[in-house]
Image (spheres, rainbow, N blue to C red):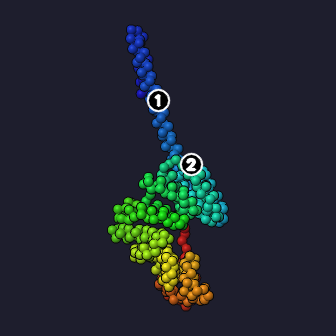
Amino acid sequence: MIADLELNCMQVKPGANNKKGGLMINRLLAILLLSTVALAGCGSAEQGDENASNQTTAANDAYEQLLKKRREVEPITERLAITKEFLDEFPESEHTANALAAVFYYQGEELGDMLGAITYAEEIRGAIDDPEIAKEVDKKLIGFYGESGATGKMITLADQLAAAGALDFDDHWNIIEGAVKAEEWKLVRDYCAKARGMTNAESYRADHPDNDLSEEEVAEAVNNRVGMLLVKDGWARANQGQIDTALADFAKADNLIPRYYFDIPEYDLNIYWAKTLLMRKKFEAAIERFAMSGLVMGEEEALTGLKEAYIGIHGSESGFEAYAAKLHLSIARTIDDFEMPDYEGNRHRFSDLRSDVTVLTLWFPT
């Protein structure tokens, strides 16, 4: 096309039509210039796409190396440093949110520097322009703020994301859990109310588009969502003095949510239920709820509550240890028979080893 334009320009002859010819030349030169700019623009766009692709590949490779390096070191400080090295080099990638979650765990929880972890996360967030990556990081930040007690920031950010329609059920749940830890009971109840609009089959399928689920599986998952919200909303109500309503919520949730092997319902239902019963000085009922979580699962919060209930009945903690040991035996559950391989690959049934001292090693490769 450019060669043709050059040829046409050369064929314009001087004479009576000189003005017209000059005008034609100017127009052709303008077209030539625009074409050249357009071609240069296409090249720039292609170059930009290629650079972005290369950056993505580099970030993915670096993240794989990050995971490998972290597995090879033990000190938390080294794991933290490795993670920050990645984020400093690639502050904006599909791995940013997960890497920041690791920073929060290492620096905030393990090393006890919550403020430092949040400050660093906010610095990384400030370097992000991609709206999708920014949204995922903001969701993580909500949890960080809740854990650290920065409730003002948590509420502001949560409301911004909710107003933008950027939150799914799991995001609402993360906000609710952060609000529970911060003891922001109104916020808990507000977001439980917002999440109730997602306790239906359509919403659940929309949140899990890649899962081929039966109607029965979806119905079970929806019931679980309803139960989850009843647990947290009930605990918020209890802390607002609405004891009867809270106990009714817990009873409803008990029939909806899944249970662990020892018949302990998920989402801390038994602990919230028992602590609410303590508020009513129903000590015996509280002990029934605390016992399995405290004595079998060893949860400190449940053990503390169990002792409080015992003191409520007996007036002091004298004799508590003997009482707890006896109670433990009375609620202990016999393990169902099972079969497992030893390190040589030979399989053994647990029932064949009951007369022997047996060490079970349960682990998963992650």
Which mark is drawn over residue 127? 2
Kindly tell me whether residue 38 is visible in this rendering.
yes
- Which residue is at the front of the view, 5 or 36? 36
State the residue at coordinates (55%, 69%).
Answer: 365
Q: CA distance from mark 2 to mark 1?
A: 35 Å
The type of residue carrying mark 2 is Ala
The mark nearer the N terminus, 2 or 1, is: 1
Q: Quadrant of the N terminus?
A: top left
SS for callout 2: loop
Within-10-Å neighbours for mark 1: few <14, some 14–19, many 20+: few
Q: Quadrant of residue 203?
A: bottom left
Which mark is drawn over residue 302? none
Residue 350 vertical placement versus 242 (above, below) = below
State the residue at coordinates (50%, 44%).
Answer: 50
Q: Is residue 316 left or right of residue 250?
A: right
Residue 9 vertical placement versus 222 (above, below) = above
Within-10-Å neighbours for mark 2: few <14, some 14–19, many 20+: few
Q: Position of residue 34 (x, y in %)?
A: 45, 28
The answer to whether marks 2 and 1 mark residues whose Cβ atoms lie closer than 8 Å is no
Kindly tell me whether residue 140 is visible in this rendering.
no
Q: Position of residue 56 (x, y in %)?
A: 52, 50
Write down the residue under mark 1: 36
Residue at the extreme left of the image, as rendered: 215
Q: Position of residue 312 (x, y in %)?
A: 55, 84
Q: Quadrant of the C terminus?
A: bottom right
State the residue at coordinates (46%, 80%).
Answer: 263
Q: Is residue 110 left or right of residue 260?
A: right
Residue 24 vertical placement versus 198 (above, below) = above
Q: Position of residue 252 (x, y in %)?
A: 40, 75
